Amino acid sequence: MEKKVPVGVSARHIHLSEEHVAILFGEDYKLTEMKPLSQPGQYAANETVAVVGPKGSFNKVRILGPTRKATQLEVSRTDAFALGVKPPVRESGDIAGSAGITIQGPAGEVTIEEGVIVAARHIHFHTEDAARMGVQDKQRLRVRVGGDRGVIFENVVARVSEQYALDMHIDTDEANAAGVNNGDLADIVD
Amino acid sequence: MEKKVPVGVSARHIHLSEEHVAILFGEDYKLTEMKPLSQPGQYAANETVAVVGPKGSFNKVRILGPTRKATQLEVSRTDAFALGVKPPVRESGDIAGSAGITIQGPAGEVTIEEGVIVAARHIHFHTEDAARMGVQDKQRLRVRVGGDRGVIFENVVARVSEQYALDMHIDTDEANAAGVNNGDLADIVD
């Protein structure tokens, strides 16, 4: 059976806690939605922040909403070298002992001691897609993407929920290494 | 049999023709060697140039010597997006119809209509290494690199010569996607 999954390429982005939104944008500020993302309820906000590391900075890092319990900056390894930070490869939400960074908004600045990660590549499966493809939550998959420059990614984490829409998330390094674009189809090998 | 190959990560770099060295650095200028590269006779020069695309530029692009018949700028796909150019993935020397760029040196500037490529990943084999591993010149290989973030690269081009030292060349996107560093070992799968 063919097991095809659309690819979504994640550029560097940040999730903010309510507390940090208040510091960066002002008390009681609410993020505003620019466009919805593939996962239900998630959106790209109109707002951006600057992130400043020991070696370099990025001026317009997109905020993804809604707010979360903890602030989390997701960068590629290429970005990490440019910033001068050493984030671990982690699943979203697993930020204990990860890298720190300084974040600047129009109303203030905050330095986090942890929260910077390189996101581990993963596939969101709706429960029905997972059942159809015989995939379990947390399973590690091998997934082929790309044409002539094709690569097989190992250790792609399966995340299964009724809240999810079928989508494989890779970062810009991974997309560029494989020569793939948003919306291209990946094949689950095993 | 184990088929292990050391990985060399290529950052963006440029090869210049003698004619372009004269324009960029002055008549009769000779590039000077900073350090030798893994391939015999090749070296990183002390000299750098700026490259300017429609969307962005890089100020200090390392020149690799010696001079070649045609100027060739090798960038990652991440770099290509930053410059605003669309180079094809090509083997070194195969620049017909590739992308153009403007190159600036201390003595002058030159705009090339073609010569910008994303280098196709490849392995240099000394003839004896190729014989030992049962690899033919121009063969396409699948090669595994990396640890937890491991990937299998397809269509890795084998290049066999008595002039070559055993080395797998990938660019920064590919290295970062796989989480590998210079000198790590890759495994030829088949």
Image (cartoon, coloured by chain):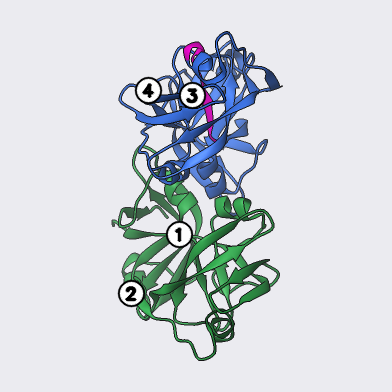
Chain colours: A blue, B green
Residue at 59% in and 28% down: A48
Q: Amino acid at mark 1?
A: Ala
Disc 3: host chain = A
Q: Amino acid at mark 4?
A: Ile
Of the two numbered discs 3 and 1 in the rendering, the one whose residue sits closer to the viewer: 1
Query: Which residue in the structure is indicated by mark 3?
Result: A158
SS under mark 1: loop
Magenta region includes residue A15: yes
Do the residues at pointers 3 and 4 share their chain? yes
Q: Which residue range is magenta in the image?
A: A12-19
Mark 2 or mark 1: whose residue is earlier in sequence: 1
Mark 3 or mark 4: whose residue is earlier in sequence: 4
Query: Which residue in the structure is indicated by mark 1?
Result: B11
Residue at 64% in and 75% down: B110
Residue ranking furthest to the front: A107
Query: Which residue in the structure is indicated by mark 2?
Result: B36
Disc 4: host chain = A
